[in-house]
Image: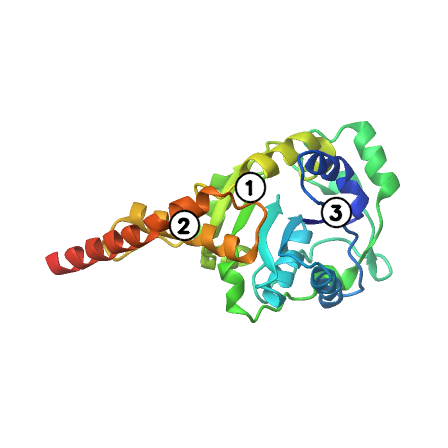
């Protein structure tokens, strides 16, 4: 599992989270993004993914989310699962942020007054001082370069979104209301939502809770939802069950360590669920 931090943070900022994940039996590493442009930072992570012998789980926080999605676009058969922490998969042609103050071609950590109060929830004075001590400036081009996505296979990779300063309901609403930066979210085949109520940096404010949610919920393969609901008149529940089994099989085939043995036992039900869904759709069409 590779954890990618957002702006101003190194991979070490995830240390409390990776330690908790390791205690739960997961091989997790926080990485520091490298490169002066968005494309270079994506390429750096792609090269890192290519060094791993087994399928990779990516965890992207904040700006690390769109960057991770660029990696998925480049390696959809190498990345088996992505977890977005208070962020989302970036949309083609959109910049990561483009609203931060630039000083001599770089973006230093702004004054705390630059952030919304929701960003700063639970970020105590001590944590703010720690953040300021470890903060590194970001290359301005990473913030403003448009994300380039070309491989539609990226949409098949299952994702989880952990909302923090906003709720899952708010995120869904913004996406369906047409927010340009969330356009990609509506095209993905498997999306699950979770909530750790805190500010924008849960690896600092609630690392134990973040790690527990990743282990207890994100790395479980049950309750996968089919984002683009069936509009043909058939049973959404049947389609969702089929898709959930398909996602489990997809992960199993890739060797996803989060895929349980129950997947093998349950996979024999998939044919019956598909038949049921097809018949339901056929009868619905016949009635119309």
Q: Measure how far apart labels 3 and 2 are at the Cα level.
A: 29 Å
Q: Name the mark on residue 250.
A: none
- The quarter of the picture where the C terminus appears is bottom left
Is residue 151 shown to the viewer in this render?
yes
Q: Which residue is mark 1?
A: 218
Distance from disc 1 to disc 3, alpha carbons, whole Å, reads: 17 Å
Query: In the current view of this chain or complex, which residue is farthest to the left?
Result: 287
Contact? badges 1 and 2 (CB < 8 Å): no
Determine the secondary structure under disc 1. helix
Q: Quadrant of residue 96?
A: bottom right
Total tally of numbered discs in the picture: 3
Q: Earlier in the sequence, mark 3 or mark 2?
A: 3
Q: Earlier in the sequence, mark 1 or mark 3?
A: 3
Instruction: State the image coordinates of residue 148 (x, y, percent, origin top left).
Output: 62, 69
Q: Name the residue beneath numbered marker 2.
A: 245
Percent position of residue 259, x then y: 53, 46
- The label on residue 29 is 3
């Amino acid at each position: 599992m590779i954890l990618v931090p957002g702006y101003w943070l190194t991979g070490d900022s995830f240390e409390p989270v990776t330690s908790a994940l390791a205690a739960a039996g997961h091989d997790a590493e926080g990485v520091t993004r490298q490169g002066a442009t968005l494309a270079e930072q994506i390429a750096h992570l792609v090269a890192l993914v290519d060094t791993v012998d087994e399928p990779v789980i990516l965890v992207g926080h904040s700006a690390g989310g769109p960057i991770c999605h660029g990696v998925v676009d480049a390696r959809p058969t190498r990345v088996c699962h992505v977890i977005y922490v208070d962020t989302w998969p970036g949309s083609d042609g959109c910049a990561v942020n483009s609203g931060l103050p630039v000083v001599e071609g770089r973006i230093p950590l702004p004054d705390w007054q630059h952030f919304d109060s929701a960003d700063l929830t639970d970020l105590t004075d001590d944590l703010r001082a720690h953040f300021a001590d470890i903060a590194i400036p970001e290359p301005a081009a990473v913030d403003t370069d448009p994300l380039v996505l070309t491989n539609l296979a990226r949409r098949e990779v299952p994702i989880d979104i952990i909302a923090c300063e906003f709720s899952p309901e708010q995120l869904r609403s913004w996406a369906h209301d047409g927010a340009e930066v969330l356009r990609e979210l509506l095209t993905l085949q498997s999306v699950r939502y979770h909530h750790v109520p805190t500010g924008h940096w849960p690896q600092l404010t609630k690392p134990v809770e973040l790690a527990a949610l990743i282990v207890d919920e994100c790395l479980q393969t049950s309750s996968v939802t089919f984002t683009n609901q069936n509009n043909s008149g058939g049973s959404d529940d049947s389609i969702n069950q089929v898709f959930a089994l398909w996602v489990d099989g997809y992960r199993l085939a890739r060797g996803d360590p989060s895929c349980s043995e129950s997947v093998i036992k349950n996979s024999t039900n998939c044919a019956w669920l598909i038949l049921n869904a097809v018949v339901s759709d056929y009868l619905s069409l016949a009635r119309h």
